[in-house]
Image: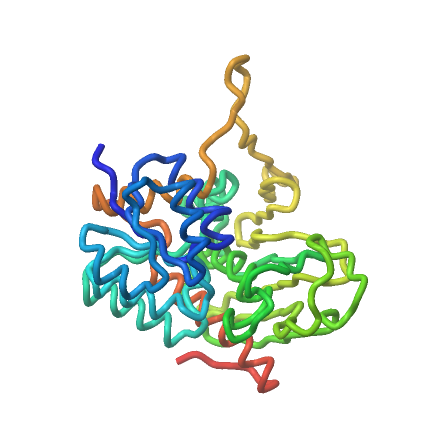
Amino acid sequence: MEKVKIGIIGCGGIANGKHLPAIKRLGRAEILAFCDLIKERADKAKEEYGTPESRVYTDYTELLAKETEIEAIYVLTPNKSHSVISIAAMKAGKHVMCEKPMAKSYEEAKKMVETARETGKILTIGYQNRYREDSTYLKRACENGEMGDIYYARAHAIRRRAVPTWGVFLNEEEQGGGPLIDIGTHALDLTLWMMDNYEPMMAVGSVYKKLGDQTETGNAWGDWDREKFTVEDSAFGFVKMKNGATIYLESSWALNTLDVDEAKTSLCGTLAGADMKDGLRINKVKYGKQMVEKPDLQAGGVAFYDGASMRPEDIEQRTFMDAITKGTELVVKPEQALVVTQILEAIYKSARENAPVFFD
């Protein structure tokens, strides 16, 4: 199979922790170029994931101008530059995989969608949690009508003490926010996808920075730098959809709670409910009795087969490659990711203005 020729823009944590290993495992792409503002990071990525012929850049515009063979660009930079780089890449004739969130603002994300339509290029966003075993199973149940009308849902992104202390995660200017835009975006994406509901009517939210100035934090990655902590440590939102459905979104990097869940959703429908709190659980009434179903998502029963399936990030890469080479449908469509960004922005705005935000 002919390999897709790609370029990597941004060689930091998300590139090395998710995309580059997955691309290597899948074996369907050839990385022609690596770009990072810090040349040493691009050099290191080339050494581990490229070839001797791969080129290194510190300016993405130079990469886009010179690398005419490249078919697809991975935008793995801080949130601030997602939109501008993705748009430039599509205008240069490249397909784009952009890491989540789509952009810092709704207007930036909207321009990305418009550019994809104008250029005819593929644009997808890195919401890999859609490809998990529990997610794909629950999505099939929703599509088959087993939940009925899903009218209430909760999107969970709660950490007790796991504030990322590296990179620019704590920088509001670079990222646009803290846990809400970082991990809340995954939970909201899963929830909207399961509901297949992308028409919000109103959002109201509260954003807190209550623990960011503390010391001896017990943080998973060591104490954070209080001077650099310019984003929220927790945020909560309530969204009403045009069809009357409601969604509660909870997110935190640091919160005094034992009720910890991340990248999960809970659904309540007219025929059944579901949550991901102890594996995937589907609750309903059958033959007049309350019951809970827990599907076995681990294949087994054969001595030489360990039940392992493809990792979500590997399936994400395969889906993107198939869309490029075979014209198959995307799982994460840019129009869907646009609504996620729209709602997140509205929650931040509601918190600032202490008022609900209504959508057009």
Rendered location of residue 260, percent (x, y):
69, 53
Q: Nearer the viewer, residue 171 or 326?
A: 171
Residue sitting at x 53%, y 66%: 181
Location of the C terminus by quadrant is bottom left
Q: Would you identify the image quadrant in which residue 286 lies?
A: top right
Q: Is residue 169 above or below residue 7?
A: below
Image coordinates for residue 339, horizontal then vertical, percent: 41, 67
Between 300 and 138, the one lying in front of the other is: 300
The spot of residue 229 in percent (x, y) is 65, 71
Q: How many marks?
A: 0
Residue 242 in sight here? no
Q: How is the image coloured?
A: rainbow
In the image, 58: left or right of 164? Answer: left
Residue 212 falls in image quadrant: bottom right
Q: Is residue 180 above or below residue 47?
A: below
Residue occupying the point 79% across, 66% down: 215
- Image quarter hosting the N terminus: top left
In this picture, residue 2 sits left or right of residue 20 = left
Residue at 56% x, 61% y: name it: 167
Between 275 and 73, the residue placed more toward the observer is: 73
Residue at position x 45%, y 51% in the image: 15
Please determine whether, in this image, residue 241 is positioned above or below residue 57: below
* Residue extending furthest toward the right: 216
In the rendered structure, the answer to whether residue 180 lies left or right of residue 79 reads right
Query: Compared to 19, does 12 lie above or below?
Result: below
> Given the current orientation, which residue lies at the most extreme top position?
303
- Can residue 300 be seen in this snapshot? yes
